Each structure stands twice: as C-alpha cells, then as structure tokens.
Image: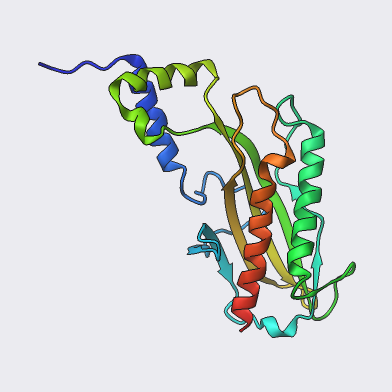
Amino acid sequence: MRKRYSLPLLAVATLVLSACSNKKVASSDTYSGFLKDYSALTEHQSPSGEPVLSWVNPTLELNRYTQVYIEPSRYYPQPAPSKRLPQTTLDDTTWYYDAALKHELGKVLTVVTTPGPKTLIVRPAITRVTASTQGLRFYEWLPITLVAAGVSTATGIRDQDSEIATEVAFVDGGTRTLVAKVVRKGTGVPLENDKEVITTANVKGVLDGWASDLRKSYVAMRQ
C-alpha cells in the first residue's frame, strides 16, 4: 500500500532539509557584495572550531604591523529598522562589534585612531541580522511529534535562532592593498517566537567569538 503523508509532515520535512542546507558558511547567493570578489575564498576552521571562508595574500608579512586601525563597522546592505529589529539594536550591535574587535586585537597590536605605515586596517561589515525557525531536534522525528512540530512552526510559537553574518577586509595601512578577507556567520541566543525583538544581547556571544578567533588567528599566522 502506498504511504500517504500529511501536509504538516511534508512541511516539516522541507523545513528540516532547508535547515541542514544552511549549515554552510555562505553561498554565492548570500554574499553581500561588500568584499566585491569572493572567488579566492576557501573554507577553513577557526580557532574555536567554526567554519570560516577566508583568503590571505601569500606575500603577507604580519610582522611588519605594529598597529591596528579598526574602521567603524557598518551594515552592508543597510537594513531598514523594524519592530523585530529596531534602530537601537542596529546601533548597539555595530558599537559592540567595534568594541570587541578593539578589545581582542588590542592585546596583540596597538589600537590607533589614524591609519598609517605599519598599520593593519580592519574593515568590518555586518551583512545579515535576522531570525529563522529552529530545525527539528532528533526526538521530534517521531511520527506523533512531527505534526506538533509542524503546527508550532506554522503558528509562530516555535523557538527561533538569532543569526548574524559578517564580511571583513584587511588592508595594509601603508600601501592600501588588500591583504586578507573573511566571511563568517553565527547563531546567537534563541528567541522564543517570531514576535520577540532581536537585541544585541542575542548576538554578543557571536561577536565576542569572532573577535577572539581573529586575534588567535593573527597570533598563529605571525609565529
């Protein structure tokens, strides 16, 4: 006898497959255009074990840098504030990102307010801040719970992941040539439903992790 699947079952299965496909760092349709050229990016593992797309100029000599200038982070493209993503969250998130980068990179380089020779310029952009419905947990694959999971998704009461992505360019302060670039995304503190407001607190841990990984990667490459 041919099995028949209910619409909730099919909807949930589609949701799960979609969630699995989103585990990649990024794909060509999610690049923001901030870095302009993505062809040389390759996937690596960050010091914290997370996937990251990056490229480093093979002639790069990190020992030449004694200072770091961190340009104010910006959104690319600029998102429109909304009830779920208010302007206060947008402003606070870029401020916190800048602070995290200065805190971590300041441990290994002198943070300056004006770029010049022997200065590594960091140009960060936040390319995505959003929320998406969480994928199914293993215990929700049971036939009886699949329907319930589908209903909770449809009604908006299912937990959501807070998501944020970044693209960063690194430029030589003397020659202004591009020396490296990075693409990353991360998942922050979950939201209870599709009405909860996204705040900077939801993604602080991700921003701290990115800044820490950047410092550790810099140290490892310099040695």
Residue 35 visible in the current orientation: no
Question: Which residue is located at x 79 percent, y 70 percent?
Answer: 106
Question: Which residue is located at x 38 percent, y 25 percent?
Answer: 12
Position in image of residue 102 (x %, y %): 79, 63
Quarter of the rendering occupied by the N terminus: top left
Position in image of residue 135 (x %, y %): 45, 34
Q: Is residue 175 left or right of residue 167?
A: right
Task: Tell me: residue 6, above or below residue 53.
Answer: above
Task: Tell me: residue 220, above or below residue 203.
Answer: below
Question: Which residue is located at x 81 percent, y 34 percent?
Answer: 87
Quarter of the rendering occupied by the C terminus: bottom right
Q: Which residue occupies the foreground of this view, 115 or 221?
A: 221
Position in image of residue 148 (x %, y %): 40, 18
Residue 214 visible in the current orientation: yes
Q: Quadrant of residue 66?
A: bottom right
Task: Tell me: residue 185, above or below residue 67.
Answer: above
Question: Which residue is located at x 55 percent, y 19 percent?
Answer: 156
